[in-house]
Amino acid sequence: MKPLYRNFFLAIGTVAIIIMLCTSELSYTELWDNVCRAGYWFPAIIILWVFLYLGNAWSWSAIIHDGAAPRLSFWRIYKYTISGYALNYVTPVGLLGGEPYRIMELTPYLGAAKATSSVILYAMMHIFSHFCFWTFSILLYLLLYGREMTTAMAFFMFLCSCFCGTGIYFFQKGYKNGLAMKTLRFFACVPGLKSRLQRFIRTREESIRKVDCQIAALHAQRKSTFYKSLFAEFAVRVAGCLEIQFILLILTDHVSFWDCVLIQAFTSLFANLFFFIPMGMGAREGGFALAVGGLSLAGAYGVYTGLIVRLRELIWTAVGLLLIKLGNKKSIPVRPA
């Protein structure tokens, strides 16, 4: 990628972080007091994400290489994984920042079609794993608390089940038939984008259909790669619940790991309903408060958990933005086969 484009992505992320820090109502003294209260659990949470991002990178690497000889190192994929998520955190609608960055970084190694399809496939896998995780959490809740469930909670579980079932159905359709062309045609109906996207579709139709063929081929012909990638993403979702447990161990020792899974599932579902907000500002904290309340825990636990998670996100976002500029001079692209 040209240095100009890297500087552009870095500038977007930096400006977004500055705006969020300046508009935050929480004082820096209060932030520091909360970090001190967390003690050694806060560095443990930061280190945990070193391994969670490794799982994300392994899932993406499985899609990129798909059993073929590696065209770029795992550590470069790891770097792009962290930087891509950093850009997703700070841009509205999430995927508008990290995915174009990843495509532009991979193109010299894989070619435009393969880079685009691998990024789209990984983004689909990441979102699909959320639906699988939410479905798993619904079953877990019914197993642990089904006998105590109120009518209101039963109705809520029914709505969540319908939402997850619908999401899984549409993703299965997308994997079977491809998604790139349909997505572009959908956005081509939006006023202001119509003429540009229709012109883009006409000039790049063959390349777009090639991307769709590669998306469909992964699910139909290379199922082992598909399920390895999906399992890695799902495992990261479950292992990420350790973050919630680490935080709650600061406050109480009466919360099990499976309760933390339910808190994480409910919170991520709530936050994703407000996907258009950069870093889900406010939505995530509200989700934590509602989630712990649903498990008969003090609402203050949810507020504190949301705060620590927000600090962790800011730190890793800063790391990801720095990685955009680091480790590029020695990059020697390998010509795609």
Image (cartoon, rainbow, N blue to C red):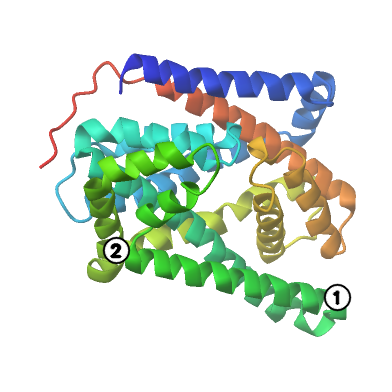
Q: Which mark is residue 152?
A: 1
- Name the residue located 75 percent from the left edge and 18 percent from the top edge: 22
Neighbours of disc 2 within 10 Å: few (<14), some (14-19), many (20+):
many
Neighbours of disc 1 within 10 Å: few (<14), some (14-19), many (20+):
few
Q: Are marks 2 and 1 in contact (CB under 8 Å)?
A: no
- Name the residue located 12 percent from the left edge and 33 percent from the top edge: 335
Residue 221 seen by the camera: yes
Residue type beneath disc 2: Ala
Q: Is residue 254 left or right of residue 136?
A: right
Q: Secondary structure at mark 2?
A: helix
Q: Quadrant of residue 151?
A: bottom right
Q: Secondary structure at mark 1?
A: helix
Q: Is residue 302 left or right of residue 10?
A: right
149 relative to 300, above or below: below
- Name the residue located 29 percent from the left edge and 56 percent from the top edge: 212
Residue 167 in percent (x, y) is at: 54, 67
> 191 or 21, which is in the foreground?
191
Q: Residue furthest front?
A: 195
Residue 243 in percent (x, y) is at: 64, 48
State which quarter of the image contains the C terminus.
Answer: top left
Residue 170 in percent (x, y) is at: 48, 68
Residue 150 seen by the camera: no
Q: Which mark is residue 204?
A: none
Residue 23 in percent (x, y) is at: 78, 23
Residue type beneath disc 1: Ala
Q: Is residue 229 left or right of residue 315?
A: left
Which comes before the other along the chain, label 2 or label 1?
1
State which quarter of the image contains the N terminus.
Answer: top left
143 relative to 186, above or below: below
Residue under circle 2? 216
